[in-house]
Amino acid sequence: MNIGEASERSGLPSKTIRYYEDIGLIRPDRGGNGYRDYAATDVHKLRFLQRSRGLGFSVEECRQLLALYEDRSRASADVKELTQTKLTEIDRKIRELTDLRRTLEHLVHACHGNEWPDCPILDELSDGRVD
Amino acid sequence: MNIGEASERSGLPSKTIRYYEDIGLIRPDRGGNGYRDYAATDVHKLRFLQRSRGLGFSVEECRQLLALYEDRSRASADVKELTQTKLTEIDRKIRELTDLRRTLEHLVHACHGNEWPDCPILDELSDGRVD
DNA sequence: TATGAGCCTTCCAGCAACTGGAAGGTCAAG
DNA sequence: CTTGACCTTCCAGTTGCTGGAAGGCTCATA
């Protein structure tokens, strides 16, 4: 499939897809006409990249995450350790998003009319490190 | 408090804090010596920025989120709509992180030895849009 | 009072991760 | 066989920092 379709299916702009190829994240085939030719696997990877980038992982971190998929010997200790690190990061992100969500909801429902520093819910939010 | 302490308390490098001032996200006082002087409020905002940036919100989105806090008339329809939009985004991010987490765990526990395209768990992961 | 470490300041340059635009080749439809 | 929507490469610009130089401020210690 051409880059346009890959773009549509992955949710990434063509420009970005070419950029990801430049920096070695994906290696699509080329047709006789020089056009890039994407397989379903490539689209999976692109969608994966689209998501993990949007979740605040750097390109280098995404490269590591992709490597977890590509590594045939996933049982290795290295890979397990890396995965564990990433799982911890993901858990932290989920926690932070949940906090953020709670803050926003409370702001709308309970804090209307008050400015930030005076709002008790935001104090509560600050991870116990309020000072 | 000086920028160093604000940095320590917010988790943001001093460089980044000065940059956020450049682009108008925060406006600390200045002491007689020209040093920036951060209040507790500023640190709250900085910590908030540190988190939301790390969760994949753009600086402009963070500016909007901060505005939600600063807007004295939070009951307005505009603000409620913006908040709702952001809540939806946050929910999506949480869902995506949860998926990502599940994928990683499954990869370690169930898929060892197989390559990506053949792994049924990754098919299942692709949001029903596998093709 | 001076000297030095460790802050702080501004300014400018560079990097990461795109993003847009120009200039031109390919392809399917009419 | 042309028109329009694709595709290609290349180069320049933007965003969001990040590092370093050059110099000023502060405070402890000699």
Image (cartoon, coloured by chain):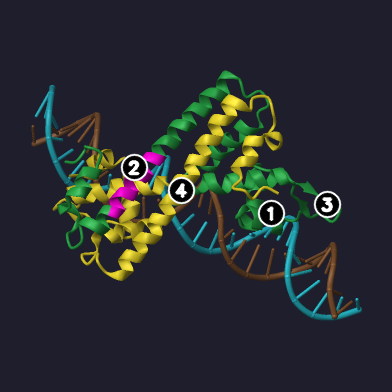
Chain colours: A green, B yellow, C brown, D cyan
**Dot 3 alpha-carbon crowd within 10 angstroms: few under 14, some 14 to 19, many 20 or more:** few
Residue B54: percent from the left, percent from the top?
Answer: 41, 45
**Separation (CA) of disc 4 from disc 2:** 26 Å
Q: Amino acid at mark 4?
A: Lys
Q: Is B28 within the magenta?
A: no
Query: Of B64 and B95, which appears nearest the observer?
Result: B95
- State whether residue B77 appears in this view: yes
Residue at which label 3 appears: A31
For mark 4, name the chain: B
Q: Residue furthest top?
A: A77
Q: Is residue B22 left or right of residue A70?
A: left
Helix or strand or loop: what does disc 1 sit on?
A: helix
Tell me, yes or no, whether dots 2 and 1 are on the same chain: no
Q: Amino acid at mark 1?
A: Ala
Q: Is residue A48 left or right of residue D17?
A: right
Residue displayed at 32% across by 69% down: B78
Nearer to us: label 4 or label 3: 4
Residue A53: percent from the left, percent from the top?
Answer: 52, 46
Residue at which label 4 appears: B93
**Separation (CA) of disc 4 from disc 3:** 36 Å
For mark 2, name the chain: B
Residue at which label 1 appears: A6
**Separation (CA) of disc 2 from disc 1:** 38 Å
